[in-house]
Image (cartoon, rainbow, N blue to C red):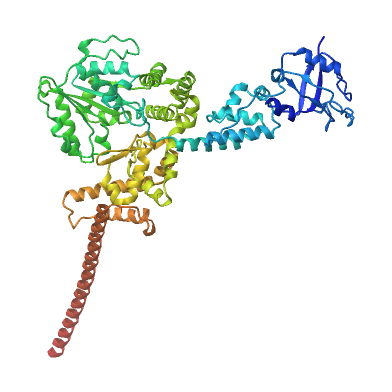
């Protein structure tokens, strides 16, 4: 016989307090094998039937009293007759709390929130308040309205950690909350947790973030084993090798943490198994007499002349020229560029005792081919870096963590692989979000929840950058903008590039504000501070931080002018600050048009002196021109006057002569 459903409304607060059981609804639903007629008090036969069905459980006092609303209101039926107000409780019914839970009547005992404060605790409190306002539905009932289990929803409001955004939104929607409002709440809590995250950790991180891998990071460099093998073979067989790859493909890390340790160890590192089981032979490596890593800069031949001389020893000296594209973006002296390239190409001769590896951004491939000697060398031996295969990415995620005794959730690995596939992320973005996820780890585990709190693959950079920017005082934000733009070289028909900048230049332009801004940006790893230089942590920031990208697009023409001004001022300094320096009228007009007097840019003392000298020269030239023009006008007037006087004098002489003849 199918049991009929009866609804018993009861006042159960006293019984709930006595047993410590959380009762979440004033309507208690039972499936019973006896009919229950509305308007009649439950008799002792019913009480005995229920008690007998669960004799082993603790007693729960059910006080059957007058109803304040129709019994079957929630069932959608017609309003029945109300119970007689004179009815009184008739006895106890023994019923297990588990029976209530199994039937979805009451929730599990919910652990009270502790006294600890914090974003996760406050968010959990808000979720519980929302659930209470919705009538206190059980977690089983909420689970039926979502795709998540009751346990998952219960943990969301536990306060132990911030739930994932998806779980939080599902919880809120099940309780009738506004999804947009709760997404904003979640993001505020996530931002607060990110701001509270430690800027450093007692343990070393297994991930490098925006920073490139260095030779000492060999034990954390995974995923590029196959390319390291191929590059080692090319270096052994050719004296000049070129590595091409788009920005963010990991060229610098491949050379520093892949090739350099391989060559220093004099044999392939068998601890790293090649991704495609490519056979590795001991002869594929060589022992160099020295390994030197250079970045061209503005005057490569001048600054690196000594490094182009081979070291003493039996082996060749290996020169790794990282960011070789700076030959075209930073070196503006054609003679300097040609001399440096010629010195590198000389390594092709065996007697040079040099071997050269060039790392070039892929969009500068055409620039290399436009130089005949370099084009020939590039064509002989080159290696292209493409995106990592899924299995290589998996190694890059999990194996550095394993080296540090950490565990990566399988769900997180899958999520990263999927996000990297759909969002076409560069390796610096990938490494940065792993670092931020590690900083938010739970114990020894990197979780999806930590990944989402970090902002995800594309949002992690924006979150870190915006957090740092908002930490600045209002007076420092303008300095931050100017400083960041000084670290950019706007592209001319190509992508924008980062510009290594002397710290003295920034401090000269912004004074004490520069120190505060630089330290703030360095803490969140947006910039790299060298001994005397500052540069963006990676060019990926140019396109992935919307605020910075917007500044560049808004000020692109101003940036081009400022890059010219800085370079021209440095050249003027190099020739001893010649007082008669000339700035073309076109440049001066550009200065006036782009920087009105009330919007003058922050300039270094050198740039200000250069402009002052150039403007003074221009004004002297204008004065001289005006004087020359005035003298010309005066001379012309005098000439005209003299001519007129001469003509008049001649006329008078002629007239006098005519009178004498008569």
Q: Quadrant of the C terminus?
A: bottom left
In this rendering, does residue 287 appear at all? yes
Q: Position of residue 138 (x, y in %)?
A: 68, 25
Q: State left or right for residue 448 relative to residue 313.
A: right
Q: Please report the residue visible at 43 percent of the width from the left and 37 percent of the height from the top.
A: 464
- Residue 368 in which image quadrant: top left
In this rendering, does residue 23 appear at all? no
Q: Please report the residue visible at 19 percent of the width from the left and 50 percent of the height from the top.
A: 573
Query: How many numbered marks have been drawn onto this rendered protein structure?
Result: 0
Q: Is residue 296 above or below residue 2?
A: below
Q: Is residue 509 above or below residue 276?
A: below
Q: State left or right for residue 73 relative to residue 475.
A: right
Q: Is residue 637 above or below residue 331?
A: below
Q: Position of residue 81 (x, y in %)?
A: 90, 28
- Residue 65 in which image quadrant: top right
Q: Position of residue 358 (x, y in %)?
A: 24, 27
Q: Position of residue 472 (x, y in %)?
A: 41, 46
Which of 445/91 is in front?
91
Q: Quadrant of the N terminus?
A: top right
Which of 258/577 is in front?
258
Which of 351/646 is in front?
351
Q: Is residue 132 above or below residue 613?
A: above
- Residue 326 in which image quadrant: top left
Q: State left or right for residue 67 relative to residue 499.
A: right
Which of 529/647 is in front?
529
């Amino acid at each position: 016989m199918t049991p009929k459903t009866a609804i018993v409304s009861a006042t159960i607060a006293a019984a709930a307090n006595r047993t410590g059981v959380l009762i979440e609804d004033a309507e208690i639903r039972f499936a019973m094998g006896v009919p229950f007629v509305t308007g009649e008090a439950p008799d002792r036969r019913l009480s005995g039937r229920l008690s007998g069905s669960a004799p082993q459980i603790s007693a729960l006092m059910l006080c059957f009293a007058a109803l304040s609303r129709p019994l079957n209101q929630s069932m959608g039926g017609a309003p029945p007759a109300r119970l007689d107000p004179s009815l009184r409780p008739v006895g106890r019914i023994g019923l297990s709390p588990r029976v209530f839970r199994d039937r979805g009547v009451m929730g599990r005992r919910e652990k009270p929130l502790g006294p600890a404060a914090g974003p996760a605790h406050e968010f959990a409190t808000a979720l519980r308040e929302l659930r209470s306002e919705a009538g206190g539905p059980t977690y089983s009932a909420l689970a039926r309205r979502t795709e998540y289990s009751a346990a998952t929803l219960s943990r969301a409001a536990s306060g132990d950690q911030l739930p994932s955004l998806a779980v939080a939104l599902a919880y809120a929607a099940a309780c009738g909350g506004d999804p947009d409002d709760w997404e904003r709440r979640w993001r505020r809590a996530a931002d607060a947790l990110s701001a509270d995250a430690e800027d450093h950790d007692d343990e070393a991180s297994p991930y490098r973030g925006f920073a490139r891998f260095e030779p000492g990071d060999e034990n954390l460099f995974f995923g590029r084993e196959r390319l390291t093998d191929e590059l080692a073979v090319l270096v052994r067989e050719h004296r000049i090798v070129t590595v091409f790859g788009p920005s963010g493909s990991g060229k610098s890390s491949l050379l520093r943490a892949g090739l350099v340790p391989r060559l220093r160890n004099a044999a392939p590192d068998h601890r790293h198994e090649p991704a495609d089981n490519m056979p590795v032979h001991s002869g594929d490596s060589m022992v160099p007499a020295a390994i030197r890593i250079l970045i061209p800069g503005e005057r490569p031949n001048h600054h690196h002349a000594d490094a182009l001389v081979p070291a003493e020893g039996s082996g060749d000296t290996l020169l790794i020229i990282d960011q070789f594209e700076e030959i075209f973006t930073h070196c503006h002296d054609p003679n300097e560029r040609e001399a440096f390239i010629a010195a590198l190409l000389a390594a092709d001769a065996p007697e040079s005792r040099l071997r050269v590896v060039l790392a070039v951004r892929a969009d500068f491939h055409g620039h290399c081919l436009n130089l005949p000697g370099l084009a020939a060398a590039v064509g002989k031996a080159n290696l292209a870096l493409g995106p990592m295969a899924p299995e290589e990415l998996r190694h890059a995620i999990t194996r550095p963590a394993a080296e540090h005794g950490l565990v990566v959730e399988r769900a997180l690995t899958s999520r990263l692989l999927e996000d990297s596939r759909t969002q076409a992320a560069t390796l610096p973005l990938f490494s940065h979000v792993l670092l931020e996820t590690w900083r938010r780890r739970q114990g020894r585990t990197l979780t999806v929840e930590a990944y989402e709190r970090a902002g995800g693959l594309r949002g992690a950079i924006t979150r870190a950058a915006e957090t740092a920017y908002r930490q600045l005082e209002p007076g420092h934000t303008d300095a931050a903008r100017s400083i960041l733009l000084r670290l950019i070289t706007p592209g001319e028909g190509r992508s924008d590039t980062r510009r290594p900048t002397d710290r003295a230049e920034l401090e000269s332009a912004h004074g004490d504000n520069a120190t505060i801004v630089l330290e703030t940006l360095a803490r969140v790893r947006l910039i790299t501070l060298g001994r005397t230089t500052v540069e963006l942590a990676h060019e990926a920031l140019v396109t992935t931080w919307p605020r910075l990208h917007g500044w560049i697009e808004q000020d692109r023409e101003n940036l081009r002018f400022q890059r010219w001004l800085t370079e021209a001022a440095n050249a003027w300094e190099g020739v001893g600050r010649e007082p008669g320096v000339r700035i073309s009228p076109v440049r001066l007009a550009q200065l006036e048009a782009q920087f009105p007097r009330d919007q003058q840019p922050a300039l270094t003392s050198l740039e200000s002196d250069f402009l002052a000298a150039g403007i003074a020269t221009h004004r002297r030239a204008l004065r001289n021109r005006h004087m020359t023009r005035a003298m010309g006008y005066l001379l012309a007037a005098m000439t005209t006057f003299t001519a007129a006087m001469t003509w008049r004098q001649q006329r008078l002489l002629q007239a006098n002569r005519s009178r004498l003849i008569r």
